[in-house]
Image (cartoon, grey):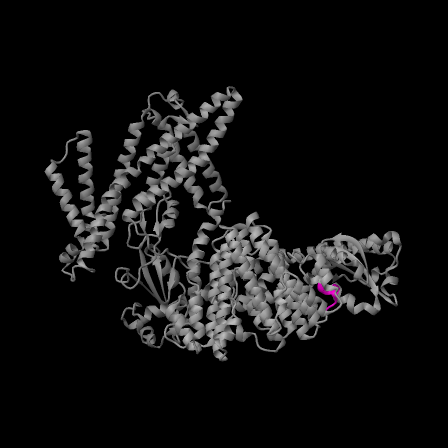
Amino acid sequence: MSVEKMSMVNLVADLALLDEVLKEIALFERIQLVNAYHEIEESNFRLSMVDENRDEILNMCRIEPYKTQVDPKALMEKAEKLLMMLDLEKKIDSAYLEDPVWDWTLERVETQIDLFTEEVSGAYSVLSALREERVHLKELECLGKLQETEVDLEEITTMEHFSARLGVLSKENRYKLSLNYENITAVVMHLDTIDRGEAELIISPKELDAETDRILRSVYFEEISIPDAYKVKAPEALRRIRARQEEIEIEIAAKLKELEVFKRSYENEIQASVNALALERVKVKMRRSIATTRNFFYLAGWIPERDEAVFEARIKKLGPGTIVLFNDTSNAIEKHTPPTLLKNRWLVKPFEMLVNMYGTPAYNETDPTVFFGLTYMTLFGAMFGDLGQGIVLFLTGMVLTGKNPENLYFHILARLGISSAFFGFFYDSFFGYEHLISKLFPFMPFLRPIENINTILGVSVGVGVFLLLISFAYSILNKLRIGDVQEGWLGRNGVAGLVLYLTLIQAVLKTAFDLPGLPTFMTVILVLASVGVIIGREPLANLMKGARPLYHEKMSEYYVESGFDILETFLSFLSNSISFIRVGAFALNHVGLFVAFHTMGALIGNLGGEILMFFLGNLIVIFLEGLIVMIQGLRLMYYELFSKYYSGDGEAFDPVRFQEV
Amino acid sequence: MSNVRKFAAVNAKVRALEGQLLKDQDYYKLLLLNHVDEVVDYLRQETWYASILPEARKVDIIELEGRFERNAFEKHEKLYHYFTDAYREYFKVLLMRYEIENLKLFLRMVIRRESLISITDHLIIPHIYSELDYGKISQATSLDELSAALAGTEYQQLIEYYKDEEPTRMMFYVEMNLDRLYFKKLSQRTEKLDAADQKAVGEVLKRNIDMLNIQWVYRGRRYYQLLPEEILNYTLLNGKYFSYKRLKELCYLPSLDDISRVLRASPYGFMFEQTEHFELNLEILMDRYLYKLFDKLRMEYPMTITEPMVYLHRLEYEMRDLFTIVESKRYNISSEACRKFLIRELRG
């Protein structure tokens, strides 16, 4: 419903407790640290002057930022390598740290990881060697192409005047080499295409070895070694290769099993080490914000007020000699603004994201989420009212939410679907068919947009005016809350602006609809008075506050600017209000599109055509118009309403979290 | 995808950035100055460069050049963000150049047994492109260690191939191969662009490849006695004028004089006419040629990738000209002599 109240927690404790306190904070995930050293420097850090705090306070004069620390990055890399060797996924889960069995110190973690690595690496290096051999053998299979020649590999590799080498070339380079065969002093024999490229057997005179080497290097020739065991007649070599390949598969399977057994028995220990390391890395980050003396450490951070008690209890449990103090934010605000944590009920919670997209509310600003959420749903429903399609949107939203609960867009989609279905019911529209719902529920009041064009458009503007009035209220409240007299009372989005707007509206109603209203001279006086106030708001506000100088710029400049400003005020009153006509227009447009599709269906003239058009029409309307209406709704919210009252220049609450750094 | 959609934003940005470049008049004035400090003062008072120079403080040449370089790099990175898809990839590969230059520097330093740590902080590291572990690289003190630090990258193999060569030869081989790698990637990326852009950028790329190829052939033959087969294999195949056939003929010519003669008769003859400061001039002539080519293409292909490309080249050339100007002041070279080494050709 609002912005969560924050307080500043100041914590002092014995240096020996540092690790445990940091761990608590990391797992608590509700504290945003600020630099304690700066806090103390600026005398924001408060400790009560009681005798038991004596040591801590005395110590504060020799304070400094926390310096020495080691980032366990290298150790983490070791752990990751271990995970890789065992083919394990990293599992970051605070449950490991909360369980005392797995709560390990860094030393313990290091010995454990070293121990495991030592135990595993033997088997793993055998496994890698086997895998490499497997790849190598796969490449040697190309020798099979020599089968028919019955050539003895032993003989050709030990020739007296010629050297033979087996290797790979890329396709491109093989082509390049082939373009220049006439100049190359070697026999190049293509054997086969393998994974790395083209396998070639190259035979060249020994005397020209140096040149051949250079030429081969220029085409990035990579040699494949032929182990002695395979230097036999080609068919026999291939047979041996196949036999060895079978052996290797068995050996690999055996090694994998061995590792699997190890993995099963020690997975928990390994994951616990990884978690301990992950925590340590979070702590490394946290330690940058603390200050220490020889005996104590000092820590400051923002905490939501309602979590205070729980936090204090958790810290006190760690041991005596910890001082936890919560400072009200009222006096801290001047120094620095607390971060904003929004608190909303489930219905409008996902809309926080859309609000944040515009800007996070400042800590002392009213959270517009509820207003935003409700209004956005209403406007969307009004523009895109269809019972059937609303249900489709809702179901789509629900299915996607189930699959991906983190993504707030899907939550929003489901809510918009409900609103669309609700309006669709009263618009008497089901998948574009009007008069269907009214047959089932004949006694409900229905408002079919296409039959009541003027009503729909009029109501839209009426709703718009109502929403604008609420924005005025928000604006005035926000401004007065931070003591901005000039804009709150005298500004165009303040009380003066509201009076002007109301006066104009009643005048319009009176003239256009002959409704009772203020007498003309009253209207004129009110308009002139409020316009005067808005134009002269800066000097007037300064007069009220007794501040000098009255103008912060040249008087003439101020009035020119202010004069144009009032012109813009009138224009924006008009445009902001009329802008809402689009709500009605889209409701009409929605029906209109369907009329078009029905007509096309009728033109095709058979049932198939009708069905085709029904699906096509609904698809297009849901995707295309749905998207447009979403954007138009957002536009109304951001442009027409937010610009009136919402600044959104806050900083989001970003607590320390236990997660991957 | 319409060209307006692709290029409207970036071209507007490019126009704005082009406004920051120096005018011919600035060049004239800079050439007439006597001292490096005066150059700095002029840039500070009269040009956009004020915003990358510290206020009222003496700036030494190294710092000055570092700032110019960083400026050029940041502008390049900035433009990258204006693109999507294939164009973004293209711009990303363009950033590979910085990595290649860094590697060349590392190699030279390792060969001279200098510590890499001293320079690592000053390097321009294209994080968008690069995945090299500069921390590990800077620890290297020998070729083997450098190669080990590059493990898993495509560069390692290159060093491994040539590490047993004599150092200057090795540098030639590795540098050629690094450039080759870059241009190969650039060619591949160019093929993914739209037809008009491909034509425009491809034109420059092909000529650039021509010039690289003939330089390799020429240098490989003149200084390093490479085998014709070898050098032919290193050349890139997608040049404009020098097709494989022409390159092959060139490589197998019996003497260096023959090669010079053929090159002089080619469209790139202008590169081989001068005799004084041959190597240095080669670069300048090549740059001037590409610069003009780009400028011409910009007229022919409006609203294409040529605009940002022309800008990047102008920026790069201006940076190098500024280096030349600053160095000329440092070594008291006359403004007339200095002018010959500028990439920008001043009128009048």
Q: Is residue A552 above or below residue B31?
A: above
Q: Residue at x 49, y 28 (%)?
A: A615
Residue A463, quarter of picture: top left
Q: Quadrant of residue A300?
A: bottom left
In the image: residue B39, left or right of residue B268:
left
**Which residues make up the magenta segment?**
B226-231
- The residue at 47%/61% (across/down) is B75
Horizontal side of A558 relative to A135 (left or right) equals left
The outermost residue toward the bottom is B332
Q: Residue B158, can we see it?
A: yes
B256 displayed left or right of A499:
right
Compared to residue B79, the image places residue A163 above or below, namely below
Q: Nearer the viewer, residue B340 or A609?
A: B340
Q: Is residue B216 left or right of residue A31?
A: right
Q: Position of residue A335 (x, y in %)?
A: 29, 64
Q: Residue A249 appears at what percent x and percent y?
A: 75, 53
- In this rendering, is residue B197 above or below A440? below
